[in-house]
Amino acid sequence: MPLIPPGPLSLVPFVSVQHMMQLVNATGVERMLADLAAYIEEDFRRWDRFDKTPRVASHSSDGVIELMPTSDGDIYAFKYVNGHPKNTRAGRQTVTAFGVLSDVATGYPLLLTEMTLLTALRTAATSAVAAKYLAPAGSRVMAIIGNGAQCEFQALAFKAICGIDTVRLYDIDPTATAKALQNLRGSGLTVVPCASAEQAVEGSQVVTTCTADKQYATILTDNMVGAGIHLNAIGGDCPGKTELHRDILLRSVIFVEYPPQTRIEGEIQQLPEDYPVAELWQVVAGMAAGRTDRRQTTLFDSVGFAIEDFSALRYVHDRIKETADYTPLDLLADPDEPRDLYGMLLRAAA
């Protein structure tokens, strides 16, 4: 994969937050979500080519800082990401991230980019990819429990990729629901604010839970989830953090990204280590069945996996070739003689 743009080896394309917003707005949110979904599906179909490991996590009482690496043998990628639920009280984001894409043959970075926005987009795109294979045919109504930073991206991804036309919103904080309601005006979706999680779930074929508190929580109880529903659980993404009652898991067909990671961080941390789950990539690749019965309760227990970030970084790398939405960043030392790094330092002082 060539460097972009061609030029001094020391210069690495850097996509700032401003650049990412320009790229998203120029592309269109729904088109970008659909494009990211296509890249994710493409990489899921070649899953066996990737290095895979659970993310490297440093946990504290306040949150978690994680590194998420992977490589397909040609390209290496990693993401730095945090999750600190208390941050919102101080006006900070719960989740922030940046990422790097590199050439395996040389070790040189190809791209450095913000990934706070990009993670929100790829998370929503991955959710919609799962629902494409797992949700009941003809699903049109979706409930979103937890109306924070991920809410609007989820709604628009399911509209663009799965044909959802109505979203029912609930959050314990009414201002979060009001924010989402305002942001989704003009989206083409029918948006219904609800007074409780039970009311939001009523009449929905798809239910997304995306709450932020780092605790064992029961956002959905067993009696709230009827047969035939597809559950998209994305809020439980670290040890000690869940959203669904255990009984829901026991009667669901469960799909995950990478079992060794999900068993540590996902809803299935509530279950025995050998409890059977299916891997989403196998469904996308046509190697395993998705939904097989209209009355099945399907669950995508999503914690986010490095291959999805790889896909997102690969997409941005490809897209910015067509734009000016990056800055060449003087990141790498590039002496005229590779062995004369100290000489380069001396010449700079002359």
Image (cartoon, rainbow, N blue to C red):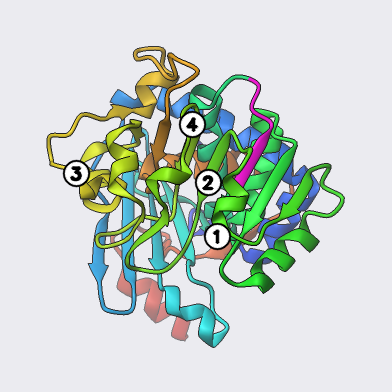
Mark 2 and mark 3: span between their CA atoms?
21 Å
Q: Is residue 250 left or right of residue 14?
A: left
Q: Residue at x 42, y 60 (%)?
A: 336
Marks 1 and 2 in Cβ contact (< 8 Å):
yes
Mark 4 is surrounded, within 10 Å at the Cα level, by few (under 14), some (14 to 19) or many (20 or more) other residues, namely many
The numbered mark, 4 or 3, whose residue comes first in the sequence reads 4
Q: Earlier in the sequence, mark 4 or mark 1?
A: 4
The amino acid sitting under disc 2 is: Thr
- Label 1 sits on residue: 146
Q: Is residue 225 placed above or below 111 in the rendered structure?
A: above
- In this rendering, the label closer to the viewer, 4 or 2: 2
Q: CA distance from mark 4 to mark 1?
A: 19 Å
Specify which label sits upstream in the sequence, 1 or 2.
1
Name the N-terminal-most of marks 1 and 3: 1
Q: Nearer the viewer, mark 4 or mark 3?
A: 3
* Residue of label 4: 130
Q: Residue at x 76, y 50 (%)?
A: 191
Of 291 and 109, the residue lying toward us: 291
Residue designated by label 2: 208
Kindly state the secondary structure of the residue where label 3 is placed.
Answer: loop
Residue 338: image location, x then y, percent:
33, 57
**Residue 87: x %, y % from top left:** 47, 79
